[in-house]
Amino acid sequence: MAYVISVGAGKNQLPFIHALEQKGYKVISFDRDQDAPGKDRSVFFQSISTHNIEAAIPWLESLGLDFFTIGCFSCGKALLTQYGIAKRFALPGSLDAMKVLMSSDKRMMRRMLEGKGLSTLEEIEVADMADDHVLDRYLLKSPNGIASNGVRRLTSEDHPAALKKQCPDWFLQEYIDGVEYRVCVIVQGSEVKYCSILERTNLHNSFIIGRLTPVFSDQELEQFVLTAVSRLEVQSAVLKLDIVKQGSRIEIIELDFGIPGDYFETHIAPYCLQYHFIDAYIDLITMKPIMKQAPRPGLYNVVDFIYSNDALNYPVNHSRIEKLVRTFDADCLWIETQAEHTVLGPPRHNQDCLFGLIHNRADYSHDEVNAWFNMQLNC
């Protein structure tokens, strides 16, 4: 009997746990939520935070089982927990420590990319700025931020002295006015087995993700990804890159070792790219060979994330959203991103979207689609 450890048992981990079940594996999971939805699908479950490796390892030891592998459908500190457990029990399914730390420390990530000749993007610590530093060519970022939380473009109205007082541990990143992309990659045996490119459009006047559109041919970006995987000496991993392209200049904005997120695994890959990402991820962590495959056009070609506007504090109502989605376009899918009755105001980060929408109406911009749903919800 093959036991697989899942770091987390929440809503986002449920598709992973379900796929493991379908393949005949026995799932052992832990999650801080005592009533996590993956609990009932696990042969053993314990209420432990995915960040609390100090509690997770003794509990796993107490089970007295031989574990087959470990997987993680989360990010940040959960990946450190995955790494620690894999090391303790000599399991596959994890990265080396440096790459895990890179995913949670943006300063370390940038130093690594610069050292490998993969970045010339200028970054400056807020604490190190000169008092007369010109700020309107930079973004302000947190070193440990996720989901674009707190990212903003600085202007001439901002002043170094104020920033040093408000956020001394943050940093400035050079702003490049180019086309942004989300790139999702699976590497096995140092070979890129899968690479999808999605053009990214941000929510109006923000750096929050608004729309993703599949790109099926960009040889320059594909070659850049191959070069990055080689120079970073990636052996077996899934990784996500946020990239900006301005003319011939290509820069990595963010790089994360771990699942892409933003519903790529569960919705975007199968419906827009004809790819079963979860199955491939399970093959990766169980060391089964993954067939090399290029993305192919799927049923849909646009993914929009819908957010409340500045005037709307909206209590999420799934049945109403369903009706509006069918009014917008009968042939589309919508992604439930929030629990029923969750009240959302103006977005602060990517995870504040009301719902996701997968469709073929590329004739409408994201701004137009987002405005239409806000208008209907505000009636």
Image: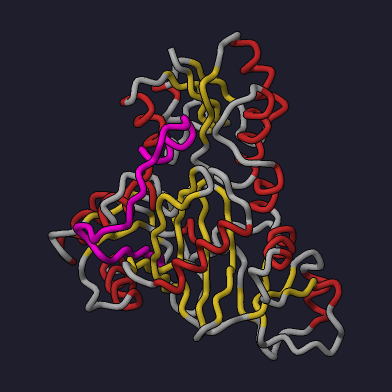
Residue 122, position in %: x, y? 71, 77
Q: Report x, y in % for residue 316.
A: 36, 53
Q: Nearer the viewer, residue 66 or 344?
A: 66
> Which region is colored magenta?
279-308
Left or right of 39 on screen, residue 90: right
Query: Is residue 219 at all visible to an observer of this figure?
Result: yes
Any part of residue 310 in sight: no
Q: Main secondary structure of the magenta part?
A: loop
Residue 284 highlighted magenta (yes or no): yes
Q: Residue at x 42, y 32 (%)?
A: 288
Based on the picture, tell me whether residue 108 belongs to the magenta stretch.
Answer: no
Quarter of image, res 277? top left
Residue at the (50%, 78%) spot, across then down: 245
Quadrant of res 348? bottom right
Asked whether, in this view, residue 310 is left or right of residue 66, the answer is left
Residue drawn at x 56%, y 13% is 66
Query: Can you give x and y, in whole percent of width and height, for residue 321 in the image?
Result: 26, 56
Q: Is residue 231 above or below residue 376?
A: above
Camera-nearest residue between 211 and 163:
211
Q: Position of residue 154 (x, y in %)?
A: 66, 82
Q: Residue at x 31, y 57 (%)?
A: 295
Q: Nearer the viewer, residue 306 or 73?
A: 73
